[in-house]
Image: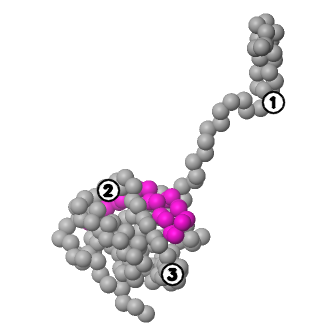
Amino acid sequence: MTAILDSPRVAELTQDTVLKFLDDFRLAYESGEDRFFSFFASDASCFTISSPTRIDSREEFKRSFGPAFAGPVTRRSQFMAPEIRITGDSALVTCHNRITVDDVVTNLRATYLIVLRGGHLKIAHMHNSPLPLPVAPVTGPRDVEEITVLEERVATAAAQVGTPK
């Protein structure tokens, strides 16, 4: 089994250190580096879109996600509008995450609980859920009755003013 490396040491938890951590996390994901798993605490819990149940440790996450992660693919991840709430030695990050693997795009809601442990930031909990595809609003008549009423009004107006010649 490959050793999990630690993330860089940080003196305190701030907005800037969390943003830097997220950027390093994103780069490790995009490059497919094994160090991606080092961003998680050993006892991290995860809800992912690829597992129907909660994952209860970094090693379990690595066993389930590692084989798919190791493949030669092009990955891109974008954290959009992250909101960071710091409380003591913990930061709660919520954002939308757009992930592209080869040509497949997945839009997620993402929540990360990041903790400062022994001078290192770690993800203690991750929760991803898929965002549904946008749906175009319905415009125009929605049922047969509305269509019939519209046809009757057009017919009545045409009878009164005539049809274009």
Of residues 136 and 124, which is closer to you in this image? 136
| Residue that label 2 marks | 84
Quarter of the N terminus within the rendering:
bottom left
**The magenta segment:** 89-108
Task: Give the percent coordinates (x, y) of residue 35.
Answer: 36, 81
| Residue that label 3 marks | 71
Disc 3 crowd, CA 10 A, few/some/many (<14, 14-19, 20+):
few
Of residues 125 and 88, which is closer to you in this image? 125
- Taking the spot 29% from the left edge, 62% from the top edge, the residue there is 19
Secondary structure beneath disc 3? loop
The answer for how far apart the CA atoms under marks 2 and 1 are is 50 Å
The answer for how far apart the CA atoms under marks 3 and 1 are is 52 Å
Query: Dots 3 and 1: beta carbons under 8 Å?
Result: no
Q: Type of residue at label 2?
A: Ile
User: Against 85, is 39 above or below?
Assistant: below
- Ranked by sequence position, the earlier of labels 2 and 3 is 3
